[in-house]
Image: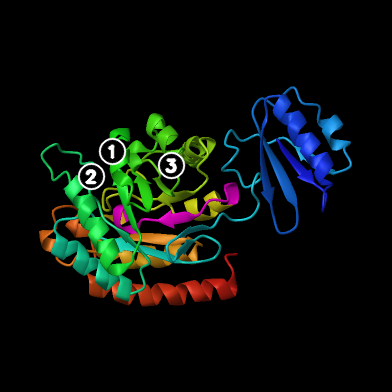
Amino acid sequence: MIVILKQNPDKSQLNNLVSWLNGKGIDVHPTVGSTQTILGLVGDTTHLDIDLISALDIVEAVRRVQEPYKNANRKFHPDDTVIKVGDAIIGGGNLTLIAGPCSVESEEQIVDIAKKVKESGATILRGGAFKPRTSPYSFQGMRGEGLRLLSLAKKLTGLPIVTEIMDISQLELFDDVDIIQVGARNMQNFELLKELGKANKPILLKRGLSSTYEELLMSAEYIMAGGNEQVILCERGIRTFETYTRNTLDISSIPVLKQLSHLPVVIDPSHSAGRADLVPALSCAAVAAGADGLIIEVHNDPAHALCDGPQSIRPEAFDKLAKKLWKVSEITKLGGND
């Protein structure tokens, strides 16, 4: 349920209303927008008298929200959520480029790539320290050492870092990580999501391989219900019958998720395609569709990468692509997303 307040509501009446709702076991989440203030009511609202609340002088309207996700719902929070990490701003009409290798392999590798993607306009560095792999015999990442090297690259370049967490037990190792990534396989690891709800840093939540929009938003709800409202949704491709590409990029997820939720939407064209030659086209399509950012795999020697080399582009290709993406972004802003 949401309660839409009239402009400049009386503070005393508002405090009384909030106290009354809290006494009924309802959590109240106020959102102050540019034109109105909305109270998002979370809990069992079935016993609340809508007519009674509507009759209050400070109340404009009361509406029930049918969707099971509340905090992530745009009805609760009409304005876009904007997340700031270092110099990067995610959401609110900004285009954020996140770039780096699939896996951290050495100090020379991660530092070199970090410097080059920053020169090309990336404002966040990505890199895997813990790698979930289908085969137990594949490279699993450098783990703690990988995190140390990411921190070194951050120190040398000033780029905030995003990397994937695999298990709750690893959380204490992520103190220097700026954005914690939850991979597609862990999207419904609800115990992990609950713990991340207590974290005081943004969470990049990737859509599961076969998950619906509602399931993705419900996973975001787990994090937000714990008190952490800094959630970034990431579309990384879904599994379909097509085998030519690694996954199928669901471009429609961008306008749909933006319609349903106020959270930023980032696209991963690298995992979507699984092919470096398709990354530029998919990236441009995502920006044109209104994506708030892209997370792109960049490697200085893809042929010898320890993980996902075929889908990684070289730094010089990223530089060329970044220039094109800024142009697409500007054209999209001029013409709108209609």
Q: Distance from label 3 to label 2 (Cα)?
A: 19 Å
For the residues labelled 1 and 3, say whether their Cβ atoms are less than 8 Å apart. Answer: no
Residue position for label 3: 199
Residue 296 among magenta residues: no
Q: Is residue 326 above or below residue 144?
A: below
Residues packed near mark 3 inside 10 Å, few (<14), some (14 to 19) or many (20 plus): some
**Label of residue 170 in the image:** 1
Residue position for label 2: 130
**What's under tag 2, amino acid-wise?**
Phe
Q: Is residue 333 left or right of residue 195?
A: right
Q: Is residue 188 above or below residue 110?
A: above
**What's under tag 3, amino acid-wise?**
Ala
Residues packed near mark 2 inside 10 Å, few (<14), some (14 to 19) or many (20 plus): many
What range is drawn magenta here? 259-272
**Upstream in the sequence, badge 2 or badge 1?**
2
Q: Is residue 103 visible?
A: no
Residues packed near mark 1 inside 10 Å, few (<14), some (14 to 19) or many (20 plus): few
In the picture, the quarter occupied by the N terminus is: top right
**Upstream in the sequence, badge 1 or badge 3?**
1
For the residues labelled 2 and 1, say whether their Cβ atoms are less than 8 Å apart. Answer: yes
> Could you say where residue 263 lies in the image, as x and y percent from the top left?
53, 51
Q: Secondary structure at mark 1?
A: helix
Q: Secondary structure at mark 3?
A: loop
Q: Is residue 63 above or below residue 128?
A: above
Q: Is residue 54 visible?
A: yes
Foreground mark, 3 or 2?
3
Q: Is residue 8 left or right of residue 246?
A: right
Q: Residue at x 20, y 41 (%)?
A: 133
**What's under tag 1, amino acid-wise?**
Gln
